Image: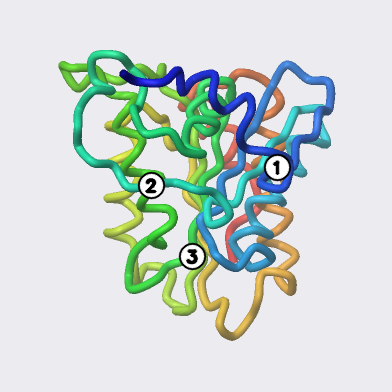
Amino acid sequence: MLINHLYFIQFCVKSRFFIHLNGGSSIKILGLVGSPNINGNTTKLVNAILNGAAENGAEKVIYNLASLNIKGCDACCRCQESGCCAIDDDMQELYQEIQAADTVVLGSPVYMWQMTAQTKLFIDRLTAFLKPDFSSRLDNKKLILVFSQGSSDRDAFKPYFEYTAGILYYLGFDVLETIIAAGTDNLEVSFRPRLLEKSRELGKLVSTTHLSGPEFRRGESSLIPLI
């Protein structure tokens, strides 16, 4: 018999896993960091976006996926009928946070030409948002992707980033933007004020109103370029 895992999270994951700050806005932005380096480049970029949103009064929540107990998908497919994953772990908290958020910011450094293992576990478990006909239970949930990479060539992993965005589109997310911090082996994000400012401005933009994808992209086009 399956336990009531949707209620289990009320008693499980505690504040050591996340920071929850309420700015009093009806807009909620969720940050998910898939880096085992909790104070690294990816975390700084995700926080910059969230901080920009908070400046406009948005509620922000951030999780570090490496600090959570997230098991791999076992392909039981029970979620397709019920909409609920049968695995009782910290992912149950994230399901509710994703549904409650207006925008999700998902960040990962590049390890071995792709996202980290911690991020991949999370992505695999998002299959719970798919219905039996493989349509999504999410209604074009807005998402910003953040990648940091040691290579100074911003296009080095472009096909993989596009592939990742495609997976997220399929799962029901509207990927508004992909931020790439290239060359972080030589110049950390902390020393790149224009990139941090770009990230903060993105946060302000997504927290201003419930913009559709095209509306967001028209506003985003006026922001300073990435470096």
Q: The N terminus is located in which quarter?
A: top left
Which residue is at 73% across, 54% downward?
Answer: 197
Label 2 SS: loop
Label 2 – label 1 distance at C-alpha: 27 Å
User: In x, y percent, where is residue 196?
Assistant: 71, 58
Please indicate whether residue 24 sits to the left or right of residue 109 in the image. Answer: right
Per the rendering, the mark at residue 71 is 2
Which residue is at 67% across, 52% downward?
Answer: 198
User: In x, y percent, where is residue 192?
Assistant: 70, 70
Per the rendering, the mark at residue 109 is 3
Compare residues 205 and 122 and report the one nearer the observer.
122
* Of pointers 1 and 3, the one earlier in the residue sequence: 1
* Callout count: 3
User: In x, y percent, where is residue 136?
Assistant: 30, 20
Label 3 SS: strand
Picture quadrant where residue 55 is located: top right
Q: Are marks 1 and 3 in contact (CB under 8 Å)?
A: no
User: In x, y percent, where is residue 47?
Assistant: 70, 50
Which residue is at 51% across, 71% downward?
Answer: 182
Above/below status of 172 relative to 17: above
Please indicate whether residue 78 sits to the left or right of residue 28 in the image. Answer: left
Residue annotated with mark 1: 50
